[in-house]
Image (spheres, coloured by chain):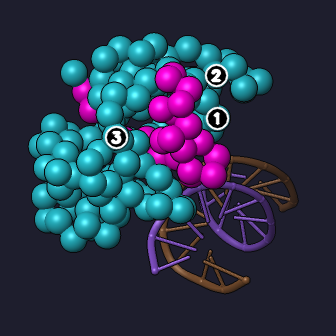
Chain colours: A cyan, B brown, C purple
Amino acid sequence: MNRWLVKSEPDTYSWQRLEKDGEAVWDGVRNYQARNNLRAMKKGDLVLFYHSNTGLEVVGVARVTQESFPDPTADDPRWLSVKLQPVRPLKKPVPLKQIKSDSRLKDLKLVTHSRLSVMPVTEPEFETILELSK
DNA sequence: GCCAACGTTGGC
DNA sequence: GCCAACGTTGGC
């Protein structure tokens, strides 16, 4: 199983909305690197859900429920979407500030490549974030 | 609201 | 194919 992190501006699509909807089509990604990451997602992969712009914290864990398919909102079928379902909210959201100050997370793309919206997370990084959320 | 970082576009 | 100009993202 692989692990990922996706970013969303809560004003556009929040974790609370995902919980309410029960499942979401993760569309609108228009960046090649992010697209390649969507393509590599497998059903059952776990996904950290991060609020960008407002919030600036990891707020929940989601799961991939459908592997990549052409993004219904794109003209070009090469852009892809996946489906996500909420698993659980973090007891304590993990703020970017805390992520940046933890040496175990220094290679996380959220820190090193801040504009990427869909990124892989290693298992130790994933576990570290869950640990910080307790 | 500002600005740095990054990606994309388009002229040459 | 290079690079300047421009647009967008996202942290502060």
Q: CA distance from mark 3 to mark 1?
A: 23 Å
Label at residue A63: none
Residue A20, given in percent of the width and then of the height, sits at 53, 30
Q: Mark 2 — residue?
A: A71
Helix, strand or loop under label 2: loop
Q: Is residue A130 above or below residue A22?
A: below
Q: Residue at x 14, y 43 (%)?
A: A127
Tell me: A93 left or right of A32. left
Instruction: Tell if the residue under mark 2 belongs to the same chain as the one under mark 1.
Output: yes
Look at discs 3 and 1 and give the one toward the viewer. 3
Based on the picture, tell me whether residue A118 belongs to the magenta stretch.
Answer: no
Badge 3 local density, few (<14 within 10 Å), some, or many (20+)? Answer: some
Q: Disc 3 marks which amino acid?
A: Pro
User: Counting residues from the N terminus, which is met first, the one under dot 3 or under dot 1?
Assistant: 1
Q: Disc 2 marks which amino acid?
A: Asp
Label at residue A89: 3
Q: CA distance from mark 2 to mark 1?
A: 7 Å
